[in-house]
Image (tube, grey):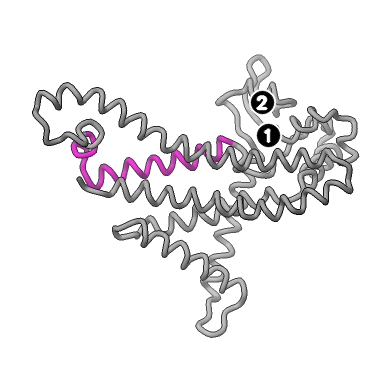
Amino acid sequence: MSEQHAALTSSEYIKHHLTNLTYGNLPGEGWKLAENAQEAKAMGFQAVNLDSMAFSIVLGLVFCFIFRMIAVRASVGVPSKLQAAIELVVEFVADSVRDSFHHAPKLVAPLALTIFVWIFLMNFMDLIPVDFLPVAAQWVGVHFFGANPHEVFFKVVPTTDPNVTMGMSLSVFALIIIFSIKEKGVGGFAAELSLQPFSSANPIVKLLLMPINLVLELVVFIARPISLALRLFGNMYAGELIFILIALLPFGLQWVLSVPWAIFHILIITLQAFIFMMLTIVYLSMASEKH
């Protein structure tokens, strides 16, 4: 644990690391930066988690910059290590799309590549020591803005913020609806939700079962983006919490536990990016199927 956090109790230290740098409208006080977790929660929807937004945008730009740089400098000769790594990722994603999406993947392949790499980069921030960037932000806040060090919050892993994961999953959800209507039309999409699998049944049976089937199908349909968001958030939040708990231990013991967990966590951050990508491909493939 850093010296700046020495005055905090263990519970306060954990809560401090799990609180976002939030700017929003606090009832009775107007627009301001939240000074604690309670204020951040009270702001509700009229708030923006500045750290999550900043890291998401910056990592997205890093992704675009690196891939464009390699695309411009790509050589047919012996590739550089970075070019070989990116070609491996692109080929892996393309194979995944071909295996799961049985239509022209004009949009799905670039979307899948963006999702996989972007989420991986956001997850990768979890491998940075938990006090490194927050203490740097704390130093800037104290020396340049005169802030109270215990009121400077800075979460560096965007995917531990449910707003980020839910935002991405809702974007996928919107694409599912667009693909469904494009392939089946509004009537076909409505029929899929209300009539399947008894579309050939007696009209009276259809009429009786339609409301029940519609409710059940809507529950399954709406559960897709929720489960997509919460799965990524839950796994990354739990991993970040373990790193924070390890940081509370004596310095020598921290390395004994954090290094093996960090090595194992490389698998987790990659797997979570892969799962989000694959489920997106599968959902869009299902939306493109005509029955």
Q: Which stretch did the figure color magenta?
A: 162-190
- Mark pair 2, 1: CA separation: 8 Å
Q: Residues within 10 Å of mark 1 (few under 14, many from 20)?
A: many
Mark 2 is surrounded, within 10 Å at the Cα level, by few (under 14), some (14 to 19) or many (20 or more) other residues, namely: many
Do the residues under discs 2 and 1 have CB atoms within 8 angstroms? Answer: yes
Give left or right: position of 145 versus 271: right
Q: Is residue 208 above or below residue 224?
A: above
Amino acid type at circle 1 is Asn
Which of 52/206 is in front? 206
Q: Which residue is nearer to you in this view: 175 or 129?
A: 129
The residue that disc 1 covers is: 20
Name the side, left or right, on which 206 lies relative to 23.
left
Residue 225 is situated, as x and y percent measured from the top left of the image, at 44, 37
Which residue is under mark 2?
Answer: 40
Amino acid type at circle 2 is Ala
Residue at 43 percent across and 54 percent down: it is 111
Which badge, 2 or 1, comes first in the chain's sequence? Answer: 1
Q: Position of residue 170 (x, y in %)?
A: 44, 38
Relative to 35, residue 163 above or below: below
Residue 10 falls in which quadrant of the image? top right
- The image shows a total of numbered marks equal to 2
Residue 199 part of the magenta segment: no
